[in-house]
Amino acid sequence: MDRDNEKREFQDVRAEETTCGTRHPKRALSLAKDRSIRRVAQMLANPGCERDLFLDAIREFGLHEHSEEYQKLLALWERRHGSGR
């Protein structure tokens, strides 16, 4: 994880802690989704990323193998890394 992402995650955690005692479920979901999106983007950009790890990450994000979004991300990964399995 690079320094900017570490800083962003720290700011997210700090923002959550400053509202202790107050529930913000939508904000927590939004932060979790942002983290997942950043993780998928980092994996896509990483030339050493393995296909299976990438597919696991997009499944964890909530995409199913037959969804259009899943297929688009897989096509992007294959374009960047080659179609080797």
Image (cartoon, rainbow, N blue to C red):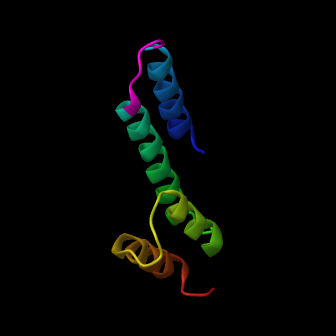
Q: Residue furthest bottom?
A: 84
Residue 76 placed where, x, y %? 43, 75
Q: Which residue is drawn at 44% across and 52% down?
A: 37
Magenta highlight: main SS: loop
Residue 20 placed where, x, y %? 48, 13
Q: Give 41 or 69, whichever is nearer the viewer.
A: 69
Compared with residue 72, is residue 84 higher up or lower down, i.e. above or below?
below
* Screen quadrant of the N terminus: top right
Compared with residue 64, is residue 84 higher up or lower down, i.e. above or below?
below
Q: Residue at x 61, y 87 (%)?
A: 84
Q: How many marks?
A: 0
* Quarter location, residue 2: top right
User: Which region is colored magenta?
Assistant: 20-25
Residue 45 placed where, x, y %? 50, 63
Residue 16 placed where, x, y %? 46, 22
- The answer to whether any part of residue 8 appears in the image is yes
Q: Which residue is drawn at 47% across and 58% down?
A: 41
Q: Is residue 10 magenta?
A: no
- The answer to whether any part of residue 50 appears in the image is no
- 60 lies left or right of 23: right
- 18 lies left or right of 82: left
Compared with residue 37, is residue 80 higher up or lower down, i.e. above or below?
below
* Screen quadrant of the C terminus: bottom right
